[in-house]
Image (cartoon, rainbow, N blue to C red):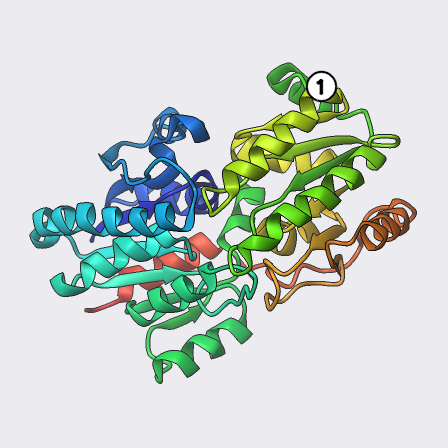
Amino acid sequence: MRVAILTSSRADYGIYLPLLRKLVAEDFFEMKILAFGTHLSHFHGYTIDKIKADGFDVEEGLETLVLGDSEEAVSTAIGLSTLKFSAIWSKMKDNLDLIIALGDRYEMFAAVSASVPFNIPVAHIHGGETTLGAIDNKFRHAITLMSNLHFTSTKAYAEKVESMVGDSQGIHCVGALSLDNLRDINLLTKVEFFEKFKIDLTLSSILITVHPETVSAEKNIAHLVVLSKVFDYLTKDFQLIITMPNADTLGTVIRNRFAELASKNQRILCVENFGTLGYFSCMKHCSFLLGNTSSGIIEAASFGKYVVNLGNRQKGRKSGENVFNVPIVEKKILETVRRLAKLGDYQGENIYQPSSSAASEIIRILKKVKF
């Protein structure tokens, strides 16, 4: 089976990783990686190099971002991605059996939509989920409707996909693929983490990722004012480790503000890209997570970590008892942080945990599928 993997960011690449390794190990598959979006942006760490450093060949690297992060820039990037992928699919259509797409990014939507006239089958990972505070919600559902195979992270999401496409055929609940990483990698100790990243995790630390709320983008500036005050207060007791936001509307404004805070306070550290090993190792050793990233919803429970989930970006996504949903209000955030600081580690289950390896189940299904 000739398979094209679409990866547009460090985030989806980290989720894909267990599947990529299994695809490469199987003679049944011929895998082609198509990297685009922030992978080819020096501003975002040029993470295509990370893919190559992990030993994978990149069939195509496409520059699909434009300068700026305004609404017009994002819309233009969608159009540019569609144009570039129309040429890619025209070239590859006769030597390709399946496209695999993950998640909900606007770049992913553009790449998949460009494939529709060519009738190349698409498999979608993480469909059926809901994030009401991000425009990604619309892109995710659109990708679902353009796909032939669906690998969902929970049974409820499988049912949502079925209600959207009107048929149960091709829908498979496999669990969260990213959690397979915990089976496959040896996380760094605090000493090893310091040697690699020069960050001391013997200090009480909060792992923070805040992306823009793209449905109500005008609120992001007000949110930054609140978060600046919150971060300043939290540094009295914690080291703050901030991973920088996605290439979304007003993402640059947020990252610039965080960089400014870090330049004035040595207890605030900004990191562009930890990679999967570094990020999960940091999650393991931190006190808890704060922000509005899906990794707090999906992965943190497997590390026994509580999460302060901010605002509406992840609103509608199912979460476990380790997640505290909090509005971006200074008093509410600090009250929740004080509560979590007394709780220790989370002892409950992760609702996204696969019953077995999600990657192995996807491989098993792909070997049997007929288009």
Q: Is residue 306 left or right of residue 79?
A: right
Count the labels in the image: 1
Q: Check the image and name the residue furthest to the right.
A: 342
Q: Residue at x 69, y 31 (%)?
A: 241
Q: Residue at x 56, y 54 (%)?
A: 218
Residue 65 in sight in this render? yes
Picture layout, residue 11 above or below residue 102:
above
Q: Residue 234's x, y, as percent?
A: 83, 36
Q: Is residue 145 left or right of residue 359?
A: left
Picture layout, residue 131 above or below residue 61:
below
SS at mark 1 in the image:
helix
Q: Nearer the viewer, residue 266 or 224?
A: 224
What is the three-letter code of the residue carrying label 1?
A: Val
Q: Residue 147's x, y, as percent?
A: 29, 67
Q: Residue at x 65, y 26 (%)?
A: 260
Image quadrant containing the C terminus: bottom left
Residue bearing the label numbered 1: 191
Q: What crowding class fits label 1: few (fewer than 14 Cα within 10 Å), some (14-19), or many (20 or more)?
A: few
Q: Quadrant of residue 161?
A: bottom left
Q: Nearer the viewer, residue 240 or 16?
A: 240
Q: Nearer the viewer, residue 150 or 226?
A: 226
Residue 188 in sight in this render? no
Q: Residue at x 52, y 57 (%)?
A: 176
Q: Is residue 279 left or right of residue 365?
A: right
Q: Is residue 230 left or right of residue 256?
A: right
Q: Residue 235's x, y, as percent?
A: 82, 31
